Image (cartoon, helix red, strand yellow):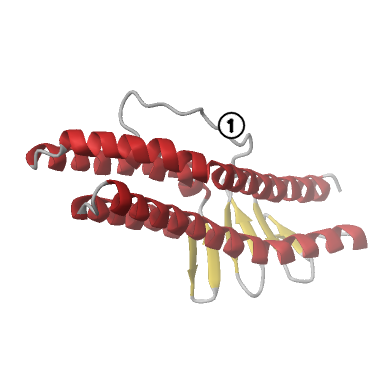
């Protein structure tokens, strides 16, 4: 997830790290949360769940039994907490990584101002990716699945651009060798320290997405089977 985008800043060509397993589940629906309902939208279905668990599928109010209504009510209730919590957790991961690398630049690269600037730029652009994936405004929370599924590729593109800026500036200021060795050392040391937390974040994200998708698919299946 997000960790690899930030970590690419400190990995030069030829330095590799073990690939993390990708979550097998990818969401295929936007989610819109309001006070009145939680709504799942894609090209196939339009599912709306009220706080009381009433279900509207593709414009038709569904007649459900008590158990399905309770299941739907609990699902939308949990989702109202889970998406904002995930967004906050992702920001916390980014904040923590930025702090770690700022400190490493201070300690190992003589507080290189240009590297700090590039790290700040990377942080802001990655945070903007997250902000555009889960948007909270005017009492609504919107999750955009295409942006979520593409966040890795977009983050890698941003990070590569920042990385080439660093190398270009290092050449211009005759600091290439110093920055190469320093960044390489940061990569080796900081990756070890951050790896457990980052792996846990990956697991948390996959668990959340899998739980949401399982509930969504089950509710749609139950409704359509009636």
Looking at the picture, how far across and down is residue 114, in whole percent?
Answer: 19, 52
Q: Which residue is mark 1?
A: 21
Say if 208 sits above or below 172 in the image.
below
Looking at the picture, how far across and down is residue 195, in whole percent?
Answer: 53, 41
Looking at the picture, how far across and down is residue 127, in whole percent?
Answer: 40, 57
- The picture quadrant where one finds residue 74 is bottom right
* Residue at x 41% of width, y 35% of height: 188
- Pick whichever, 93 or 137, lies toward us: 93
- The picture quadrant where one finds residue 80 is bottom right
- Pick whichever, 151 or 111, lies toward us: 111
Q: Secondary structure at mark 1?
A: loop
* Residue at x 33% of width, y 23% of height: 14
- The picture quadrant where one finds residue 168 is top left
Q: Is residue 98 left or right of residue 49?
A: left
Within-10-Å neighbours for mark 1: few <14, some 14–19, many 20+:
few
Say if 36 sits above or below 64 in the image.
below
């Amino acid at each position: 997830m997000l960790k690899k985008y930030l970590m690419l800043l400190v990995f030069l060509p030829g330095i590799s790290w073990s690939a993390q397993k990708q979550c097998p589940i990818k969401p295929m629906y936007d989610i819109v949360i309001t006070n009145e309902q939680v709504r799942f939208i894609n090209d196939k279905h339009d599912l709306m769940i009220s706080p009381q668990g009433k279900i509207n599928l593709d414009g038709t109010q569904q007649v459900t039994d008590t158990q399905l209504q309770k299941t739907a009510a609990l699902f939308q209730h949990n989702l109202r907490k889970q998406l904002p919590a995930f967004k906050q957790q992702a920001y916390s991961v980014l904040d923590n990584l930025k702090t770690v690398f700022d400190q490493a630049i201070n300690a190992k690269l003589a507080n290189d101002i240009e590297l700090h600037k590039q790290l700040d730029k990377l942080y802001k652009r990655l945070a903007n990716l997250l902000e555009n994936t889960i948007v909270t405004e005017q009492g609504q929370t919107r999750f955009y699945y295409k942006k979520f599924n593409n966040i890795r590729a977009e983050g890698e593109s941003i990070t590569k651009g920042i990385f080439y800026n660093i190398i270009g500036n290092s050449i211009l200021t005759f600091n290439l060798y110093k920055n190469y060795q320093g960044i390489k050392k940061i990569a080796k040391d900081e990756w070890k320290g951050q790896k457990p937390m980052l792996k846990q974040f990956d697991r948390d994200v996959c668990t959340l997405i899998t739980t949401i998708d399982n509930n969504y698919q089950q509710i749609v299946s139950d409704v359509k089977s009636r």
